[in-house]
Image (cartoon, rainbow, N blue to C red):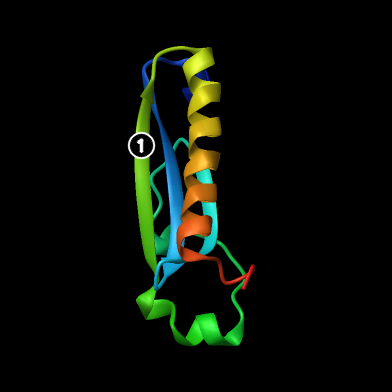
């Protein structure tokens, strides 16, 4: 059986975990995430505000290995743009 990433077309998801639009963490891969499917260590302030956590998910359909790699690069760029625009809890 082929690995999911070798079967086309498939989705690549960029998932950005945020509070007040500030990034806490991100994951890029083959699954849409919600805050319940995420393993992350949070500081006390973020634990108290976990109810306020949102996940921004953006998908991209890919049809070959070149598009697959490009989707990861696109996802990384989206994360960088988000951090520049809104900040990160770990960069402030």
Residue underneath mark 1: 59
Q: Residue at x 58, y 65 (%)?
A: 40
Q: Position of residue 16 (x, y in %)?
A: 45, 55
Local SS, label 1 = strand
When the figure is inspected, residue 29 is found, relative to residue 3, above or below; the finding is below
Q: Position of residue 39 (x, y in %)?
A: 56, 62
Q: Residue at x 37, y 79 (%)?
A: 51
In the rendered image, which quarter is residue 41 located in?
bottom right
Q: Position of residue 33 (x, y in %)?
A: 41, 51
Residue 1 seen in the figure: no
Q: Residue at x 46, y 59 (%)?
A: 85
Residue that protrudes farthest toward the front in the picture: 85
Total marks in image: 1
Q: Residue at x 52, y 40 (%)?
A: 77
In the image, 1 versus 7, the foreground residue is: 7
> Which image quarter holds the C terminus?
bottom right
Q: Position of residue 29 (x, y in %)?
A: 50, 38
Check disc 1: other Cα within 10 Å, few if <14, some if 14-19, many if 20+. Answer: some
Q: Is residue 72 left or right of residue 20?
A: right
When the figure is inspected, residue 81 is found, relative to residue 55, above or below; the finding is above
Q: Is residue 58 left or right of residue 86?
A: left
When the figure is inspected, residue 80 is found, relative to residue 62, above or below; the finding is below
Residue 72 seen in the figure: yes
In the rendered image, which quarter is residue 42 located in?
bottom right
């Amino acid at each position: 059986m082929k690995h999911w990433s070798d079967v086309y077309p498939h989705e690549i998801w960029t998932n950005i975990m945020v509070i007040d639009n500030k990034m806490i963490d991100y994951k890029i891969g083959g699954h849409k995430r919600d805050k319940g499917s995420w393993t992350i260590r949070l500081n006390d302030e973020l634990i108290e505000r976990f109810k306020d956590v949102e996940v921004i998910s953006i998908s991209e359909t890919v049809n070959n290995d070149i598009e697959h790699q490009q989707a990861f690069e696109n996802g990384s760029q989206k994360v960088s743009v988000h951090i520049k625009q809104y900040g990160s809890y770990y960069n402030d």
